[in-house]
Image (cartoon, rainbow, N blue to C red):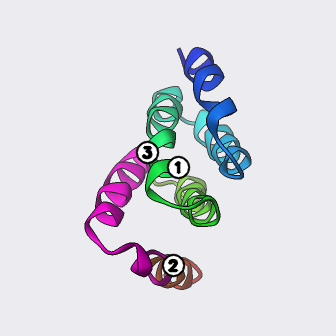
Amino acid sequence: DCLAIGQSILPKLGREREAILSLALTLSKSSWRQVKICFDLAPRVSQQLNSAQAVRFLKLGEQLARVGVNDTSAYLRDGIQAFNRVPQISHEYILDLAETLSAV
């Protein structure tokens, strides 16, 4: 299932392709179900955020997966919904804050 979804979405992605693959690799170590959900959500990430922001957002998700957060797909789903509710001009600032917090 993941391979079929990956084949259909990856060619459509831009700079965020590498970030989504890196996240998927990290998730695959614990849950293929999370990889499938991640691939399902990838187009929404690309639609909602510009390429640079999408890469940052996905890297934050990968950091969560690396420290043992079991439901990284909830971060992706809820994060995209939240970005959809705020003005696009705020996206950069929100990502700045999230990256600062993740470093703590």
Residue 53 among magenta residues: no
Marks 2/3: CA distance? 17 Å
Q: Neighbour class for label 2 at 10 Å: few (<14), some, many (≥20)?
A: some
**Closer to us: 12 or 100:** 12
Q: Residues within 10 Å of mark 3 (few under 14, many from 20)?
A: some
Residue 92 percent coordinates (x, y): 51, 78
Q: Which residues are magenta?
A: 70-93
Residue at 62% x, 60% y is: 59
Q: For the residue labelled by badge 2, is the local secondary structure a helix, a strand or a loop?
A: helix
**Observer-nearest of 104 and 77:** 77
- Any mark on residue 56, and which? none
Residue for point 41% across, 45% down: 73
Closer to the chain start, of discs 1 and 2, is 1
Residue 2 coordinates in the image, percent (x, y): 56, 21
Q: Which residue is mark 3?
A: 44
The quadrant of the image that shows the C terminus is bottom right
* Secondary structure, magenta segment, majority class: helix
At 44% from the left and 40% from the top, the residue drawn is 41
**Residue linked to disc 2:** 92
Asked if the residue under mark 2 is in contact with the one under mark 1, i.e. CB atoms within 8 Å, the reply is no
* Circles 3, 1 touching at the beta carbon (< 8 Å): yes
Q: Quadrant of residue 85?
A: bottom left
Q: Which kind of residue does numbered mark 1 sit on? A: Ser
State the residue in front, 90 or 65. Answer: 90
Q: Which residue is mark 1?
A: 46
